[in-house]
Amino acid sequence: MWSGNIKSAISSLRLNKWRTLLTILGVTIGVASVVTVVSLGEGLKKQVVGQINQLGSDVITVRSGRLTSEGVGQDSLNVLALLSTSTLTDSDAEVISKLPSVETVVPINFVTNTASSGQNRLDNIFVIGTNSDVADLLNQKVAYGSFFDERQDNGNYAVIGPRVAAQLLQKLNPVGHTIRINGVDFVVSGVLERSSGGLLSVAQTDFNSAVFISLAQAKQLTSGRTNILQILAKSKDPNIEQTVADIESTLQKNHAGQTDFSVLQQYELLNIANKVVDSMTAFISGLGAISLLVGGIGIMSIMLVSVSERSREIGIRKAIGATNRQVLNQFLLEGMALSISGGIIGIILSLVVNGLLRVYTNLEPVINLRVLVVAAAVSVAVGIVFGVAPALKAARKNPIDALRNG
Amino acid sequence: MSLINLREVSKLYGFGGATVLALDEVDLVVEKGEFLACMGPSGSGKSTLMNLIGLLDRPTHGTYLLDGRDVARLRSNTQAKIRRDRVGFVFQYYNLLPRMNVLDNVALPLAYKGMTPVRRQKRASDILELVGMRDREYFMPRQLSGGQAQRAAIARALINRPSIIIADEPTGNLDSNDSKVVMELLADVHRRGNTILLVTHNPELTRYANRVIYMHDGQIIGDEPTAIGRLAKGVRRTYYRRRRTTEEDTVAGVSALLKKVPGKELAGGSRARRSPARKRRVGRRSKKVRA
């Protein structure tokens, strides 16, 4: 019986190819967007974890604003802190560097996002003022040339990421060439190795498209105004908790008793990054879920049309002995065939999109089996939920009325 | 115990002022093995009666005993199973499912019974052999002529070896040749011991029946046993001696057609009570027309 039902479901769907295609579009888009977004989120998380492992667990990050606010019962993410301008200053970095328990301090000072060389111009990079300890602290290796050292700290030297090198200079070895930032020429002293850093990396920087210049130069470029995104510090003391407490109390003193900053260890940073990604994923998946809902309603309306159109068929089937349940099953299966095929196409589409994202962007979405299983299950559920009403309508038809009206 | 037993069965359609009385307290007993032809003008309730007997519809009033069981008490599920196993329908418009080939159409009742595809196709194939349609198993219904489609429909009706075959104007859409083939098939089925209920407009087909009932306005107004091969007497009266309308009648319009309601002379038995009154009424009107 089931095989017959499946056969007849597929044949009736093939009869109205365009209608079928348009009907399943809603489910397709819903499934594709949810799967893509969730896998993007998973990919981001994985990148963040990778970067934190790369940095080592003894790096302490100081960020502006209180990132977690104490809600009722549990911590929640303080979104405002991510949006506000930095409250960190040069003097904060100085104070921290004087602490006995701190080995190195690296301020990350965001300067601008454009640089040019000759005719080429890039406007989606991060120009960051920092000191020569940054490479060491971030475990970043230099592929060509060298990082500017202490002697050159105040010179016009820049270390650039591989993407910047490739797009701006387009030469095999860019060391020694100049790039122009805010009207000032900088000599490229080194090119970083390609890193796996993603968009939402720890330093909020993709090292591949970063330009590092010295802090003093950065200050000159921005006429003394600094915008320190974060301060990275390495603990001398193996007891990191103690160092964190030291930094916290020192900074509090420096900020006139206010705690408008967060001192975070790597795992805390990881948690925050995960929270950001999770809430974004949930939000966009919610939009996808609305599309699924709309798709389900589309399936329901088309199935209702189909039930009225095929009144005569229902009458014939009942006349030759189909029970209500058998008619119900037939139409339910048809609704499910619609939503399941929508789901399958959606999954395939999301795989294609993921592939394209991997090729054309530096995002690395991760599709895990769980997401696919859930997507498939949801599309089956949509078919059942929105197929039941039309199927019931078909099953409850009075056979003689169905025959007469057909 | 009779196979079919209807007691004062009525069927109403519609509500309020638009109510139509399709069956008016019909009593009918059909024994196993009968070939019953049901005749009457359009709208006389023939099809409604057949649909009730075939459990496609439920009576508004009255009781219907099938094999001594009151069908009104059966759940719709059980009714569906009775339709599947005990009743075979043959319709005027064949009612084959257009998207299935002949073999699948014929095998469909078996599918609802839960038989495996291989077994049911084998059985359908055998039945198609019986009706001479074996060579068209894989044709789609639209590729068949009317007679072939009706033979396929009969095969479908027969596949569950039902005890009752209900044929509602099975030859209504067929030419005389195809009609003959279809009727011979039904006669053959009857000879094997099946009960056949045939609705028809064609008096010639009463030759196949051994009992003819005449219906008018939802009532059975005549019921006569007849020998197979003979034209029923009542039919002879209505069919061969039907008065032609005169020129005057044409001028008089529709009312003239009412001056002789066919079959009224046949009225007898339980319904005789009402007939004389109607006869008088009709008589008066016809006199007036002539005058």
Image (cartoon, helix red, strand yellow):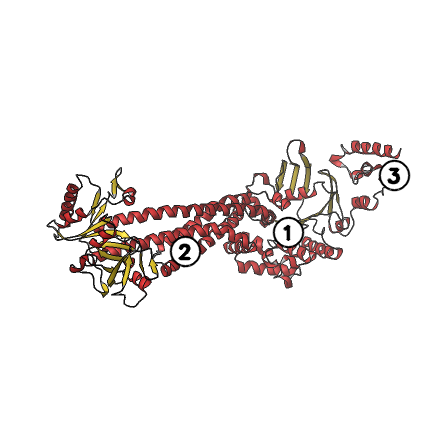
Give the residue pinned by disc 1. Answer: B95
Q: Position of residue B112 (x, y in %)?
A: 54, 52
Specify the farthest residue to the left.
A100
Q: Which one is closest to the eye, mark 3 or mark 2?
A: 2
Secondary structure found at label 1: loop
Residue B177, percent from left and from top: 75, 57
| Mark pair 1, 3: CA separation | 44 Å
Front one among A52 and B33: A52
User: Going from the N terminus, do you reach mark 1 or mark 3 first?
Assistant: 1
Q: How many C-alpha atoms fall within 10 Å of the one at disc 3: few (<14), some, or many (≥20)? A: few
Asked if residue A370 can be seen in this view, the reply is no
**Quadrant in the rendering for residue B216:** top right
Q: What is the x, y in percent for residue B15?
A: 64, 33
Q: Amino acid at mark 2?
A: Ser
Left or right? Give the position of B283 relative to B100.
right
Which residue matches tag 3? B248
In front of the other: B100 or A280: A280
Residue sitting farthest toward the right: B291
Please say if A292 is above or below A192: above
Say which amino acid is labelled 3.
Glu
Q: Are marks 3 and 2 on the same chain?
A: no
Which residue lies at the image location 86% right of the left edge and 32% below the top edge?
B288
Instruction: Judge from the rendering whether residue B230 lies leftward or rightward of residue A344; answer left or right.
Output: right
Placement of the C terminus of chain B among the 4 image quadrants:
top right
- Please state the horizontal and vertical placement of residue A110, each as a whole percent of the image: 26, 51
Under circle 3, the secondary element is helix
Viewport quadrant of the N terminus of chain B: top right
Name the residue beneath numbered marker 2: A350
Q: Are marks 1 and 3 in contact (CB under 8 Å)?
A: no
